[in-house]
């Protein structure tokens, strides 16, 4: 947004400008002729040139920190009218008069609505300059798919992807507004917990390519059925403009009713438009895509990430980028990170979140890669509703079928896994107890998977054990 002046920023946000910045004491406090570099919602994170947006929360109103943001060098603030009036009055006195540094002051009755409107306007500005936007959602693997796609296209296009967790009605606009004017591909992750949320994000992002990685039993407690989950994810398809491209799993009966004939559709998976033809002994993969073959050498080999790779390749082709050669992906934190402990113990830190689909994928990874004993610390899978006991028991049975040697469950729901796990197992209440128990159980050469829903906080297991990244 650096090219936009204060008047244009205000207009795009639908906000009222109380002050447009001025020069004082021979230095620029805020120049109305140039726009902000990005938007932030935490006044403690403000850097010179930022637009601070003060959002109302359940307990506090971020607008109360508008003065602090201006003191930190913010280009301007976008807050509710009462806070805008207050900070405008204080800034008018000037710092020598006991006031605060001057800056652009914008008022809107709902700063979140203004933030979203500003993001949409900036997205359209990027699009007018030729940028393409990809929106990615799914029950599991959407972050990894985002990471893979960004790595695939970054060598050929100026690419920006949403940072970790910037996938909500607040985070997505912030990610969009951080994209520089020269961006050619913008990869945005879209998360949801209920109906209407993906539609809201799609309306802001206006994706040229929409990717649904999969549909699974996530948020069952809120949505009630797999069909409802599919419909919520398919809001991405419903919100795309005619002629855009939808990337979906092949032959998915849950998504089939939501496909549109006025969109280009690319399927991925077995016997799909984009499919995995061969995995070579040196780690290279051959991918078939509508009569063409692409050879890649990814830095990963897990089966679930190779499937995510197919979705990313389909999106890459939709963008006009032919993937090839080495592909190094630095996955977002807490998603399958392999960490080295003492005595050659490897900890697979995959505790960002968990659901039945991602649990099975992580167990497959552990079973397929561990050279010696295979241990798993598995926490509660939350928001599964009445089916939670059964779904947890099924994970215990799956862990047994995949030959895991030892299971530690964390939390009351995860304890159900032990009823179907025939090997050595333990149940503990929390992450701290799991870490303490692991110290007595681990032996040289073990591989241990740590995975559970975010609310269980299993990242504390790795922190407690003093794990360090492999590189």
Image (cartoon, helix red, strand yellow):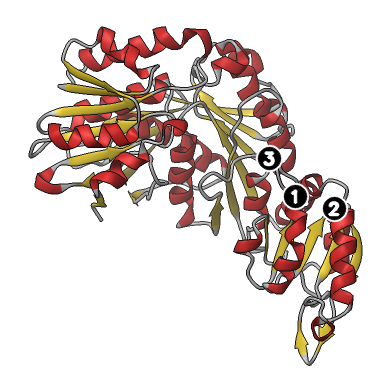
- State left or right for residue 114 relative to residue 214: right
Q: Which residue lies under the disc numbered 1?
A: 61
Residue 279 x %, y %: 25, 33
Closer-to-camera residue (158/323): 158
Residue 291: in sight, yes or no?
no
Rendered position, 87 above or below 350: below
- To which quarter of the image does residue 66 belong? bottom right
Q: Secondary structure at mark 3?
A: loop
Closer-to-camera residue (20/300): 20
- To which quarter of the image does residue 278 belong? top left
Q: Secondary structure at mark 1?
A: loop
Closer-to-camera residue (426/249): 426
Res. 80 mark: 2
Residue 11 x %, y %: 89, 57
Disc 3/disc 2 C-alpha distance (Å) = 18 Å
Viewer-side label of 3, 2: 2
Viewer-side label of 1, 2: 1
Residue 250 x %, y %: 48, 20
Q: The C terminus is located in which quarter?
A: bottom left
Q: Looking at the image, which residue is at 55% across and 46% down?
A: 320
Q: Which residue lies under the disc numbered 3?
A: 169
Residue 172: in sight, yes or no?
yes
- State left or right for residue 151 relative to residue 135: left
- Asked if the residue under mark 2 is in contact with the one under mark 1, i.e. CB atoms within 8 Å, the reply is yes
Res. 302 mark: none
């Amino acid at each position: 947004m650096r090219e936009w002046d204060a008047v244009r920023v205000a207009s795009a946000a639908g906000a009222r400008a109380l002050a447009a910045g001025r020069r004082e004491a021979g230095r620029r406090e805020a120049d109305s002729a140039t726009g902000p570099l990005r938007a932030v919602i935490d006044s403690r994170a403000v850097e010179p040139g930022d637009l601070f947006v003060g959002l109302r929360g359940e307990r506090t109103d971020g607008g109360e920190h508008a003065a602090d943001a201006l003191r930190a060098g913010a280009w301007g603030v976008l807050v509710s009218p009462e806070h805008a009036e207050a900070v405008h009055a204080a800034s008018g006195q000037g710092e020598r008069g006991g006031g605060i540094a001057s800056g652009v002051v914008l008022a809107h009755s709902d700063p979140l609505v203004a933030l979203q409107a500003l993001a949409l306007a900036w997205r359209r500005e990027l699009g007018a300059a030729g940028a393409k936007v990809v929106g990615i959602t799914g029950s599991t693997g959407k972050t990894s798919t985002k990471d893979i796609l960004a790595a695939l296209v970054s060598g050929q296009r100026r690419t920006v992807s949403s940072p970790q967790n910037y996938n909500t009605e607040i985070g997505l606009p912030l990610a969009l507004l951080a994209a520089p004017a020269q961006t050619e591909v913008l990869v945005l992750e879209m998360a949801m917990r209920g109906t209407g949320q993906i539609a809201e994000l799609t309306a802001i992002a206006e994706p040229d390519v929409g990717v649904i990685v999969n549909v699974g039993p996530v948020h069952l407690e809120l949505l009630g059925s797999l069909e409802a989950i599919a419909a919520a994810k398919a809001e991405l398809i419903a919100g795309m403009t005619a002629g855009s491209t939808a990337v979906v799993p092949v032959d998915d009966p849950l998504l089939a009713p939501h496909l549109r004939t006025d969109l280009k559709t690319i399927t991925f998976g077995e016997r799909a438009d984009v499919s995995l033809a061969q995995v070579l002994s040196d780690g290279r993969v051959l991918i078939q895509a509508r009569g063409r073959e692409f050879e890649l050498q990814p830095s990963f080999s897990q089966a679930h990430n190779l499937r995510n790779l197919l979705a990313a390749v389909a999106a890459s082709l939709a963008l006009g980028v032919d993937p090839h050669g080495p592909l190094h992906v630095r996955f977002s934190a807490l998603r399958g990170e392999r960490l080295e402990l003492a005595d050659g113990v490897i900890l697979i830190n995959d505790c960002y979140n968990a659901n039945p689909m991602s649990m099975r994928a992580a167990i497959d990874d552990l079973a397929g890669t561990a050279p010696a004993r295979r241990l798993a610390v598995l926490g509660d899978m939350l928001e599964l509703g009445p089916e939670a006991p059964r779904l947890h028991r099924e994970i215990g049975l799956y862990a047994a079928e995949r030959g895991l040697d030892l299971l530690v469950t964390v939390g009351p729901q995860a304890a159900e896994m032990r009823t179907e796990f025939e090997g050595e197992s333990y149940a503990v209440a929390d992450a701290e107890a799991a870490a303490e128990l692991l110290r007595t159980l681990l032996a040289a050469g073990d591989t241990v998977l740590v995975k559970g829903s975010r609310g269980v906080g299993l990242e504390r297991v790795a922190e407690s054990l003093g794990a360090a990244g492999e590189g």
